[in-house]
Amino acid sequence: MKIYSITILSLLLLVSCKEDKKEPQNKTEVNPENSITLTNDQVKNAGLVVGNPEEKNVKGILELQGTVTVPPKSVVSVSIPLGGYIRKTDLMAGMHIRKGQLLAVVEDMQYIQLQQDYLTAKEKFQLAKSEYDRQKELNAKKASSDKLFEQTATEMQTQRIYMASLAQKLALLNINVKTLTASNISKTVAITSPINGLVSKVNVNVGKYIAPTDMLFELLEMSDIVLVMNAFEKDIHLLSVGQTVTAFTNAKRSKKYTAKIAYINQSLNDDRAAEVVCKVNQYDSALIPGLFINAEAEYQNEKAIAVPEDAVVRWQGKFFVFAVTGNNQYKMVAVEPGTTTDGFRQIKSSAIDKSSKIVTKNAYTLLMTFMNGGDQ
């Protein structure tokens, strides 16, 4: 009985082996090592083209980081030369202001005295000028001495100088001496904005006494913002003044800002990096001072391995090319993609060089075949 059972089992195994040998010979083979083997018909139908990578001069991208900054010339500290008490101010940090807009009203007794002194000096000058004109006429007729004429000329000039100096002091307080009369002497002066910009600091409140050395407000002229990026010493030679960079923030990477390099500081900081100052082509209110920002600068790279764009495929978030490993055998090789220039993409891989054979056309068709397990 045992002999019959063994005989039947042997026959079944023999039939099974024969059936395995009858599998189609033109089926695509896929192994777990990211390799695929196609038939001649599949290669022809897919339109695959094989070629070698090339060495090309391609553009590289240098990544920079930095912050949005306002240059010193656009940061305005507002003070008043004579001091006084703050009687009115509506400013708060973050407010936008216009040139000539009222920032604060300051009051002090010395403002009255200064206006009084100017009007008095003005009257004395008019009197001295009248006397000078009279003495000049008399001296021309030899009716007065030259000494007396010189004295009146000196007195007129003295009064002119004193009046002019007082006028300059009043100008510092924004008091127009051309319209100043005894009837409009004021105990207050108005402080107005010298720029269009943003209020960044407010150091006063109503009733506070401020000295001439105190900073009342800090204003920023926002339209003149710059990007201060850091470039390490090994990368400085890749940058030049006038070079275009593309900037973006971490919060909104899709929003791009075009800027140009205006200055490159040749002095390195403690991190062995140089400051690269870039001017934005068009101001955007989203670029606020202190904001962290990224930038990309294109540069002409040295010769690098490049392949046609159609040779590079993306799968599961990574980039690959198909290397030819034998007769109709292809292997997916991971690469690090670079920039694209004139239809060629730069790639980096220790397994690919200019002597490698790769699929240069219809690589995506090969990828689809691979993803489908070889069924075409």
Image (cartoon, rainbow, N blue to C red):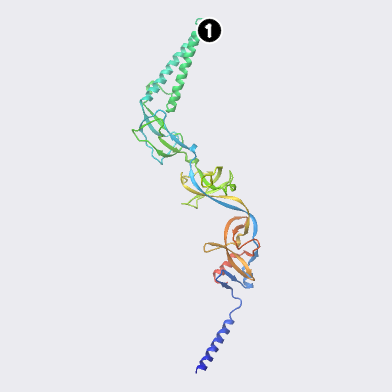
Corner quadrant of residue 113? top left
Characterize the local packing of mark 1: few (<14), some (14-19) or many (20 or more) Cα atoms within 10 angstroms: few
Check disc 1 and report the residue beneath it.
140
Q: Residue at x 47, y 16 (%)?
A: 158
Quadrant where the C terminus is found in the figure: bottom right
Q: What's under tag 1, amino acid-wise?
A: Ala
Q: Residue at x 50, y 47 (%)?
A: 66
Give the side of residue 116 with respect to residue 23, left or right.
left
Image coords of residue 221 (percent x, y) = 47, 39
Image coords of residue 165 (percent x, y) = 45, 22
Up-down relation of residue 206 to residue 13 (above or below): above
Image coords of residue 327 (percent x, y) = 64, 71
Any part of residue 280 in sight = no
Mark 1: secondary structure: helix
- Residue positioned most to the left: 207
Any part of residue 20 in sight = yes
Image coords of residue 131 (percent x, y) = 46, 11
